[in-house]
Image (cartoon, rainbow, N blue to C red):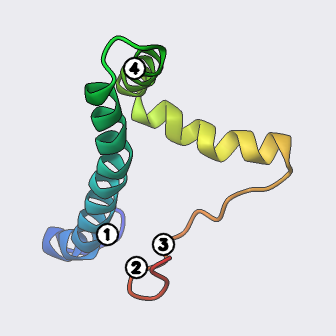
Amino acid sequence: MWTEKTVLDEITTALPVTLQLGLMGILVAQLIALPIGIYSAMRQDTWGDYIARSFAIFCIAVPGFWLGTMVIVFPSIWWGYMPPIMLIRFTEDPI
């Protein structure tokens, strides 16, 4: 291996970060999806419903790796800002 660490050491290092990233992704997805779904259910077949549905289908169709790359690349091109790509633990800075 590259790091001369055991597989168990590699897993114990990566597992907490992976779980945090997965849980935060699920939380953000639910915070976006539930209001859109409720709005679409309450106002079926209106322009707002069509727009919300189209947005949801677009979000499902866009590959995550491409969207993540664009989130990093576009701010650096348009505004000259490169988002910090490092881990800040949720317990250190929850917001």
Give me the disc on residue 78.
none
Residue 93, position as x, y percentages in the image: 49, 83
Q: Residues within 10 Å of mark 4 (few under 14, many from 20)?
A: some
The amino acid beneath tag 4 is: Asp
Residue 86, position as x, y percentages in the image: 54, 69
Seen in the image, is 36 located left or right of residue 10?
A: right
Do the residues bearing badges 1 and 3 touch, measured as CB atoms within 8 Å?
yes
Residue 8, position as x, y percentages in the image: 13, 73
Residue at numbered disc 3: 87
Give me the disc on residue 17.
1
- Distance from disc 1 to disc 2, alpha carbons, whole Å, reads 10 Å
Query: Upstream in the sequence, badge 1 or badge 4?
Result: 1
Circle nearer the viewer, 4 or 2: 4
- Distance from disc 4 to disc 3, alpha carbons, whole Å, reads 37 Å
Residue at numbered disc 2: 90
Give me the disc on residue 49.
4
Question: Which quadrant would residue 73 be assigned to in this image?
Answer: top right
Depth check: give the residue in front, 83 or 60: 60
